[in-house]
Image (cartoon, rainbow, N blue to C red):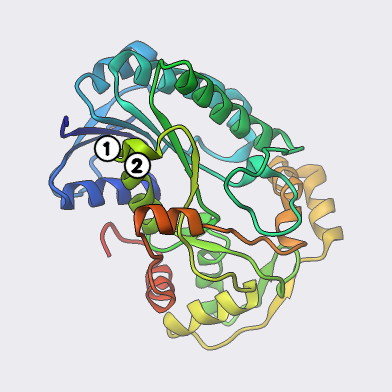
């Protein structure tokens, strides 16, 4: 098997995928628009526009796997960026012969009743969920047609190292250190699955390198669902932070903010995730790959670090 791997994106998932592959002895290149060095030992870096299918195909030449670990800015630019980017990634995988491994989200499922299992229909009603559902539908169609080998892994809200202010949990750490109240979306007391970003990397690399896993979605092994209040208190304790009040942000406040703030309008569309149990069933991946999630105490310690390349 070819030992070269190309990762598009240098966010938390891309960096963890690179670390995991290098530790396993693979040749790894991270592609970003700037080509900035992540500082991960043994990883090469290349600057390219990943919406340029020709440039991306050249970079993926000889690669065993092309990983889609991109995260194009905030929600307000998804409709402009993702269609071009996902089309180029799929084309590059098809033309290079690399396995196409996609870092997915749970958004395509939309509002659900009961645990989310693989095989659940993609029934999103918001534009972000429908966009991500279409990305997978396109890749799956190409896979079924024999043009590409594709696989997607989906995790819940990320915790762990390097998430910073983009995480629903980690973003509260700086204010909590100052004794400020943690204001959360939706209910603070409903079960919600959180996924360690390192476990995303472990799962997507396992799925990419296992031919029997291609052509379907896998859920990332994650710890038992906990409430936002429980998770915040666990992470604050791991960070050595004294407990602070955890309160729900009133829906009226979110609605008012969404009138003037486009990003808040996008978040408001996802409010359903925090107003009902949001639980991931990942038993299939545990059984197939033999992967267990990072122990919860370690997850809390990793999240408390907020930043860092390796942990």
Which numbered mark, 2 or 1, is in the foreground of this view? 2
Q: Position of residue 145 (x, y in %)?
A: 47, 15
Is 7 positioned to the left or the right of 150 in the image?
left
Q: Secondary structure at mark 1?
A: loop
Q: Could you tell me if the residues under marks 2 and 1 are in contact, i.e. CB atoms within 8 Å? A: yes
- Tell me what residue is drawn at x 78 percent, y 47 percent: 258
For the C terminus, which image quadrant?
A: bottom left
Q: Is residue 189 visible?
A: yes
| Sequence-first tag of 2 and 1 | 2
For the N terminus, which image quadrant?
A: top left
Q: Is residue 165 above or below residue 295?
A: above
Q: On the image, numbered disc 2 is attached to which residue?
A: 10
* 256 or 71: nearer the viewer: 71
Q: Quadrant of residue 187?
A: bottom right
Q: On the image, numbered disc 1 is attached to which residue?
A: 36
* 294 or 218: nearer the viewer: 218
């Amino acid at each position: 098997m070819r030992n070269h791997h190309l990762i598009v994106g240098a966010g938390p998932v891309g960096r963890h995928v690179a670390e995991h592959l290098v530790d396993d002895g693979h040749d790894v290149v991270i592609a970003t628009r700037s080509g900035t060095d992540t500082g991960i030992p043994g990883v090469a870096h290349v600057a390219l526009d990943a919406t340029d299918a020709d440039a991306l195909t050249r970079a993926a030449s000889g690669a065993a796997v092309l990983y889609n670990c991109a995260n194009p800015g905030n929600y307000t630019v998804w409709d402009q960026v993702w269609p071009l980017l996902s089309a180029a990634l799929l084309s590059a995988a098809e033309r290079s012969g690399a396995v196409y491994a996609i870092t997915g989200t749970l958004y395509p499922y939309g509002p659900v009743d009961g645990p989310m299992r693989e095989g659940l229909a993609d029934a999103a009603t918001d534009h972000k969920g429908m966009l991500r559902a279409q990305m997978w539908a396109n890749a799956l169609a190409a896979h079924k047609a024999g043009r590409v080998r594709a696989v997607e892994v989906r995790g819940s809200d990320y915790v762990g190292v390097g998430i910073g202010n983009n995480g629903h949990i980690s973003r509260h750490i700086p204010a909590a250190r100052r004794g400020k109240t943690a204001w959360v979306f939706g209910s603070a007391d409903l079960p919600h699955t959180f996924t360690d970003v390192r476990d995303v990397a472990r799962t997507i690399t396992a799925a990419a390198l296992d031919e029997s896993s291609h052509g379907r979605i896998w859920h990332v092994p994650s710890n038992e669902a906990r409430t936002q209040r429980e998770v915040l208190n666990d992470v604050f304790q791991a960070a050595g932070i004294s407990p602070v009040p955890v309160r729900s942000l009133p829906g009226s406040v979110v609605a008012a903010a969404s009138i003037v703030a486009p990003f808040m309008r996008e978040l408001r569309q996802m409010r359903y995730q925090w107003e009902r149990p949001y639980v991931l069933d990942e038993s299939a991946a545990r059984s197939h790959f033999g992967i267990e999630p990072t122990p919860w105490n370690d997850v809390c310690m990793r999240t408390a670090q907020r930043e860092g390349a390796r942990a």
